Image (tube, grey):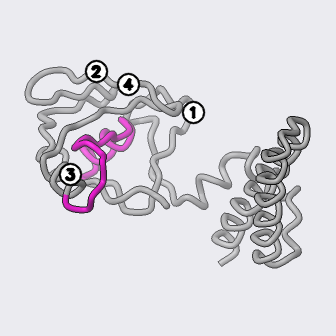
Amino acid sequence: MYCKELTKDYLIELGVSDVSRAGVVWVDGKIKFPVYNGGYYKISFYSNEIYLNNKANGNSLQGTICIPIQRIVWAWFNGKCKAGYVIDHKNDNKLDNNLDNLQEFTPQENLMKHKDYSNAMLKCDLTKPRKFYEDKLFDQLYAYEQAKQLKDKELVHRCRTDIYQTRCKLRFYDKFAQISD
C-alpha cells in the first residue's frame, strides 16, 4: 500500500549523478526535468530490470518507473527512504522539494498532521465491523449494475455517490485501525 524502500545506491543504478538540496536532479550529467502528476513533481526513469520483470510476469507495462522528487531528495541526502514511510512537506506545499522542507513520517503521523483527514475520520461512523461496510459496498455495486442496465441516469448517479461514500468509510476504517493499533 505504501512506498517501497528507496536507496541512494538504487538511484545511482538508475543513472542519477547528482541531486541539489533544492530538488534539481541530474541524470547522466544532464538535468532531468520532472513531470507534474498527481499533485507532485515526479521523475521517470527507464530500467531494463523493470522491463524484464514486467515481461516475465506478463505485464504490459513498459520499463519505466516514476519516483516523486521529494523521495529522491530525501534518499540522496539521508541514504534511503524507509519502506512504508512517506516524505512529507513541512509547509504543505507539494511543489517545494527543498531538503529543509522535507520530513520522514509514518503514514499514521502524516494522516494525523492533516486536519481534514482527521476530521473526516471523526465524522465517519466506525461503530460497525468492517465486514458491514464490505457487504454494503457489494450490495451497492450490484444496485449500480442494475441501474446501468435500466439506463436510469439519476439512479446511476445516486449509486455512484453511495459507492464513493462507502469506499471512503472503508479507507478511513483501515486508517483508523492502523492508528489505534
Q: Quarter of the image holding residue 150? A: top right
Front disc: 2 or 3 = 3
Task: Looking at the picture, tell me which residue is in the foreground, 58 or 121.
Answer: 58
Q: For residue 50, which numbered disc appears in the image? A: 3
Residue at mark 2 to residue at mark 1: CA–CA distance: 23 Å
- Residue at coordinates 37% horizontally, 62% vertically from top-left? 83
Q: Which residue is mark 2?
A: 33
Q: Quadrant of residue 170?
A: bottom right
Identify the residue at horizontal 30%, vertical 46% (top origin): 61
**Could you tell me which residue is drawn at 29 percent across and 43 percent down?**
65
Mark 3 or mark 4, which has the lower sequence index? Answer: 4
Write down the residue under mark 4.
35
Which of label 2 and label 1 is nearer to you? 2
Q: Do callouts 2 and 1 mark residues in contact (Cβ within 8 Å)?
A: no
Position of 120 relative to 27 (above/below):
below
Does the residue at mark 2 contact the one at mark 4 (Cβ under 8 Å)?
yes
